[in-house]
Amino acid sequence: MDKFVITGGTALQGEIPTNGSKNSALPALAAALLTEEPVILHRIPHVRDIRTMQRLLIDIGSNAEVDGETVRLETARVVCPEAPYELVKTMRASSLVLGPLVARCGRARVSLPGGCAIGARPINLHIFGLEQLGARINQTHGYIEAEAPDGLRGAVVHFDRITVTGTEDLMMAAVLAKGETVLRNAACEPEVVDLAGLLVSMGAQIEGAGTSTIRIQGVERLRGAEHTIIPDRIEAGTFLIAGAITGGDLSVTGCNPEHLGALVSKLQQAGVDVTQQDATTLRVRGGGRIRSVDMTTEEYPGFATDLQAQYMALMTQAEGIAIVMETIFENRFMHAQELARMGANIRLEGRQAIIAGPRELTGAGVIASDLRASASLVLGALVARGETVIDRVYHIDRGYEKIEAKLARVGAKIRRVD
């Protein structure tokens, strides 16, 4: 397994680019199953999860051509409407093919998902929604088997709790259903809006994406389309925190500042200078006193759970006591004990973490437990005294494209060791 070796103490300086959003690209790739015509997607990041999804689509029957950040998918015929355990176990977003396959083929067999060990992320909301649309669902031998031989029909689906992948999956299923589907308590994330934009360009009729109520009028077929994925707000947010924690002067380019409002607000409350340079660039200047600021994760437009671990790393360098409350996932503090190995003062009480600072972090051997936890360890290592070795960085490769190369270009002393 690869490791990162990081020597801390360098303030990051310069410009660092943002890739296309992994969390937007994954459902967009799955949406290509809804038509037999070519779907061309631009700004696709080269990360492990994307490669896994592409392998899955090829197994299903897609022809995939990759040219830099552009992927061309054509699924003239679905050969095998199945997502096997071998692929799904590594990435729960593989379950996003469930809705498109049932909508197009009338059947699908998808393994129960795996992915990061950050708590239960059940697929039951996807299943409930598909049943409302008329699919027959069976669970056997670790697989979800869905059938709708006469096609799906529109219905009102009220999610018991907000689910991003559930909203995306049901939206893709509903575009080919007969009649109108209404999704209530739907997720409002930018990634949902981006997927809706792609589906509309393919001929779908969708209203309300970005609000809690989405209306979809089913159509008989979809056509091919060309679409550019939105910037990755989680990657951009991670880099903003990197600039702040190292006391640097970092411009994060190619991002969408509107998608980062909650993080920017917290950083400014903490005394970090964050300014918008142009429509796609945020500049962060650290070096001053960082104040402790409480934070609670929430669905968009609230503070993203995918930035909680990175924010916690920043709070280890802040003056005072900060309380971080995790409301989305029940087991997303696995990075806390690794940061504590580096010298952080963190106490866990149920779904809240209490961080006392500032604390001098020192280099240590640490292990990445999930995608965003690994990013927090990189941030801690950038400011730690001495050398930090981060093991199991395949987690970070799931969502960040060559993060070590990007950070090295703005001054970080980081290298990958095979």
Image (cartoon, grey):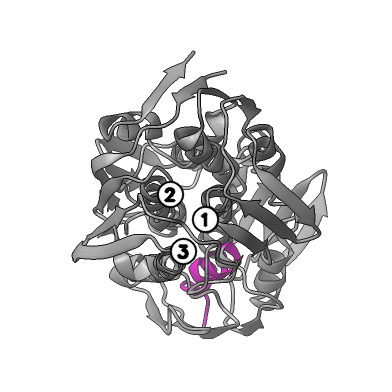
Relative to 31, does residue 171 appear above or below in the rendering? Answer: below
In this view, the residue in front, 318 or 163, is: 318
- x, y percent for residue 341: 68, 32
Residue beneath the point at 46% across and 79% down: 218
- Residue at 31% across, 62% down: 274
- Residue furthest to the left in view is 278
Which span is picked out in magenta? Answer: 165-178
Which mark is first along the chain, 3 or 1? Answer: 3
State which quadrant residue 139 falls in.
Answer: bottom right
Residue identified by numbered label 1: 307
Give, as a three-letter code, the residue at label 2. Answer: Thr
Q: Residue 195's spot in the image, x, y percent?
A: 40, 65
Q: Amino acid at mark 1?
A: Leu
With 172 as the anchor, is 39 left or right in this view?
left
Q: How many marks?
A: 3
Q: Amino acid at mark 3?
A: Ala
Q: Is residue 135 visible?
A: no
> Residue beneath label 2, please?
238
